[in-house]
Image (tube, rainbow, N blue to C red):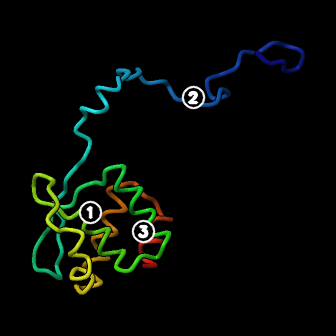
Amino acid sequence: MGAKDGKCTMATPTDIPDHEVAEEPRKLVTARDILDAEDISIELFDVPEWNGSVYLRTLKSGEGDEIARLMSKNTPNANARVAIKCICDQNGGLVFKPRDAEDLANKSFSAINRILEKIVDMNNMGESADRELEGN
């Protein structure tokens, strides 16, 4: 209610700021629910430089930690090492071994960079991670 010329007036809906309506809360998950969740996603990704596509999977949390360490130390072949953690088969099994990093580092920068950009997007890593990956 407001006062106008000494009279009381009611606020109109346009005078009231918009507020978001709270959604119904989702189920509260247990530790077992979290550990049992299938939360790693797999996407088919086109790599024109290789005349085909590869499957990419999201990183596991521990792998994300390992990648952060790789980037902070300016590790040789870091971009290839990141790609190795995500290039997989249709079931999510990794197709490269860590020992393949040097061989993969000798492949097209354009292809690896395209894959890294998709990895950043799939893992919600943000712009700072994108800049770090591009710098290696």
Q: Secondary structure at mark 1?
A: loop
Residue found 49% across the figure and 25% down from its top: 21
Residue found 34% across the figure and 75% down from its top: 79
In front here: 99 or 39?
Answer: 99
In front here: 61 or 100?
Answer: 100
In front here: 57 or 96?
Answer: 96
Q: Is residue 27 left or right of residue 11?
A: left
C-alpha gap between disc 2 and disc 3: 44 Å
Q: Secondary structure at mark 2?
A: loop
Q: Tell me which amino acid carries mark 1.
A: Lys
Q: Pointers 3 and 1 in contact (CB under 8 A)?
A: no
Q: Earlier in the sequence, mark 2 or mark 1?
A: 2
Residue at mark 1: 85
Q: Tell me which amino acid carries mark 2.
A: His
Residue at mark 3: 70
- Mark 1: few/some/many CA within 10 Å (<14, 14-19, 20+): many
